Amino acid sequence: MKVLKFGGTSVGSPERMQGVREIITRDSDKKIVVLSAVSGTTNTLVEVASEYAKGNSDKSIQIINDLYAKYEKFVDDLFKGEDFKKKGMEVVDKYFEQINKLIKQPFYEQTEKILVVQGELISTNLFTLHLQEEGINANIIPAAEFMVLNEQSEPDLLEIESRLEGFLEENKSYDILITQGFICKNFNGGIDNLKRGGSDYSATLIGAAIGAEEAQIWTDIDGMHNNDPRIVENTFPIAQLSFDEAGELAYFGAKILHPNCIVPAQQRNVPVRIKNTMDPDAKGTLITSEKNPDTVKAIAVKDGITAIKVKSSRMILAYGFLRRIFEVFEKYKTPIDMITTSEIAVSVTIDDPKNLTEIVEEISPYGSVEVDKNQSIICVVGDFVAQRKGVGKDIFKALEDIPIRMISYGGSKNNISMLIDTNYKKEALIALNKNLFGL
Ligand code: ASP
Ligand code: MG
């Protein structure tokens, strides 16, 4: 069995939804189809929640009404017959009733959580009806009833597996099962979500839980590219990546995949394939356990990075210095991405500057602190063995005219990272594309 996930733009209009139907009915294999919300809907629901939380209830009602009008048109265009148009509007009305009810109650954290997942409930129910109107033997299964988190707020794969088994057994007469991405239930039984972009994660979790032949992520690009196609002209889709390489790429910059989604696939060795809904025959990118030693696969970039350098106030570095510094980051729940150290100083990067002022204040007693904002991590991903000669030369030759703030290699053998000022980003990506890929 395969799992196929379609993102927001892939279900973004009635025509695109019909396109998804064509893709999933190209063969008669049994499959699970995971859908995101129609593009724009989750953002709109986040906005509704934030206006409502601020007390702007008129504004939030206005936004909801505009969204409702879009769905009225969507339903009218998606369905052919009057009976299905009516059923489609019943779906829309049911979930909008829920949305309207929520914003009449006092606002609390759970309100937002329930609000933001309504988009997936609408898209999957409309799509299932559409398949039924087309005579396809499909049914819907509720993600909230099997996608569950454990006490640490991590997906509980064993529990997901056993619950899904039950749903598959109950629905074994159906060819296609539709379910929601993004939605889950937390350990307390409350509705929750797998964070923005989490539908990818839903798909690989389901793939891992059922031991799928493959988890496919259908999106609006023909695979993961060797460089950022929004910035660099000559890029190409990467045919194959190892799980480790894809994990690095998903985390650093390449916005195509949710950063965690490789983890369950790698754990249960389920291949992940990225495909383009606009060009279903394009090969896309296949992610498997296969490694290709000594190859450079891609260049990724992550912006919005802050670098913090702490220079010890004592000339001879005493033990405990790093621990004291790291404890401050831990206290403020701020993850560190990159670290470099010298005998008397340490530099770290963070991508969440929310508590920067407090962090700087609390590390100041241990040394002089310098902060550089507006930095980018450029990350060269591949399978580098220490013996490989020449990668370093090719990278640094490309960056010869660019000031490098930090360099990190050796943490994993799949990435070499450099920190530069974001102003040099474009120049660096183009030069690396030329030197590493000859483009
Ligand atoms: N609809 C959710 C979002 O926009 C989840 C997803 O699309 O992956 O973040
Ligand atoms: Mg996405």
Image (cartoon, rainbow, N blue to C red):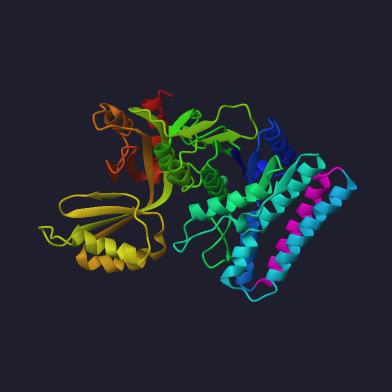
- Residue 248 x %, y %: 40, 42
x and y, in percent, of residue 253 in the image: 45, 44
Q: Quadrant of residue 314?
A: bottom left
In this view of the protein, can residue 50 be seen by the observer?
Answer: no
Q: Which residue is most to the right?
A: 82
Quarter of the image for the C terminus: give it.
top left
Rendered residue at 28%/45% (across/down):
406
Q: Is residue 59 magenta?
A: yes
Left or right of 19? Residue 335 is left
Instruction: Give the farthest residue toward the top.
Output: 438
Magenta: main secondary structure equals: helix
The residue located at (20%, 65%) in the rendering is 366
Task: Mark yes or no: residue 374 visible.
Answer: yes
User: Tag count in the figure?
Assistant: 0
Query: Is 111 displayed left or right of 195 in the figure?
Result: right
Does the magenta portion include 398?
A: no
Instruction: Give residue 218's position: percent from left, percent from top.
Output: 60, 38
- Using residue 367 as the reference point, say whether residue 171 is left or right of it: right
Query: Residue 367 at what x, y percent from top left?
Result: 20, 63
Q: Quadrant of residue 113?
A: bottom right
> Which sits in the foreground, 377 or 95?
95
> Which stretch did the figure color magenta?
56-80
Residue sitting farthest toward the bottom: 106
Which quadrant would the N terminus be assigned to in this image?
top right
